[in-house]
C-alpha cells in the first residue's frame, strides 16, 4: 500500500491540472511558451500517474476498473467483481 503522503501528492497534482487546464490550452493555442513556463510544473497533465483507487499502487493499473491487478485478483477471488 502506498504511503498517504504519496497519494495526497497525486491528488494535489490532479487538482492543479484541473485548475490550469483551460489556461494551459489557451496559452498553447496562442503559442505563448514563456507564459507556459511560468505555470506550476505539476499543472501539466503529463505529470499525472495512474494509481489504484483502493491501495494507491502505481504499477499494474487496470484502466477499465481503476484498480491494480493485485487488487483486481483479490476482489475477483472473493467474487466482488463479475
Image: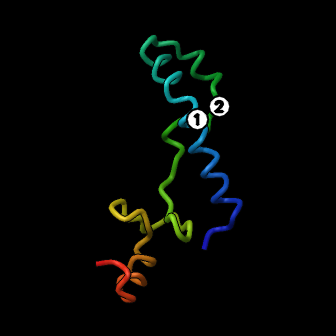
Report, in whole angstroms, how far the alpha carbon at label 2 lies from the one at label 1.
5 Å
Q: Quadrant of residue 67?
A: bottom left
The 10 Å Cα crowd at callout 1, few under 14, some 14 to 19, many 20 or more, is: many
**Residue with the mark numbered 2:** 40
Residue 36 quadrant: top right
Residue 8, given in percent of the width and then of the height, sits at 67, 55
Pick whichever, 57 or 81, lies toward us. 81
| In the image: residue 43, left or right of residue 28 | right
Where does the image place residue 35, in percent across and percent down from the top left?
60, 16
Disc 2 and disc 1 in contact, CB within 8 angstroms: yes
Q: Which mark is residue 4?
A: none
Q: Name which residue lies at 33% across and 61% down.
A: 64
- Which mark identifies residue 43? 1
**Image spot of residue 82 (x, y percent):** 28, 78
Q: Which of the pair 47/76 is nearer the observer? A: 76
List x then y, in percent, for residue 60.
42, 68
In the displayed structure, 63 sits above or below 43; it is below
Q: Secondary structure at mark 1?
A: helix
Helix, strand or loop status at disc 2:
loop
Amino acid at each position: 500500500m502506498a504511503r498517504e503522503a504519496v497519494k495526497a501528492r497525486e491528488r494535489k497534482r490532479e487538482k492543479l491540472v484541473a485548475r490550469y487546464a483551460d489556461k494551459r490550452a489557451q496559452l498553447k493555442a496562442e503559442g505563448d511558451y514563456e507564459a507556459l513556463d511560468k505555470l506550476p510544473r505539476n499543472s501539466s497533465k503529463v505529470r499525472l500517474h495512474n494509481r489504484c483507487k483502493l491501495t494507491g499502487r502505481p504499477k499494474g493499473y487496470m484502466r477499465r476498473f481503476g484498480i491494480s491487478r493485485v487488487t483486481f485478483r483479490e476482489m475477483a477471488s472473493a467474487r466482488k467483481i463479475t
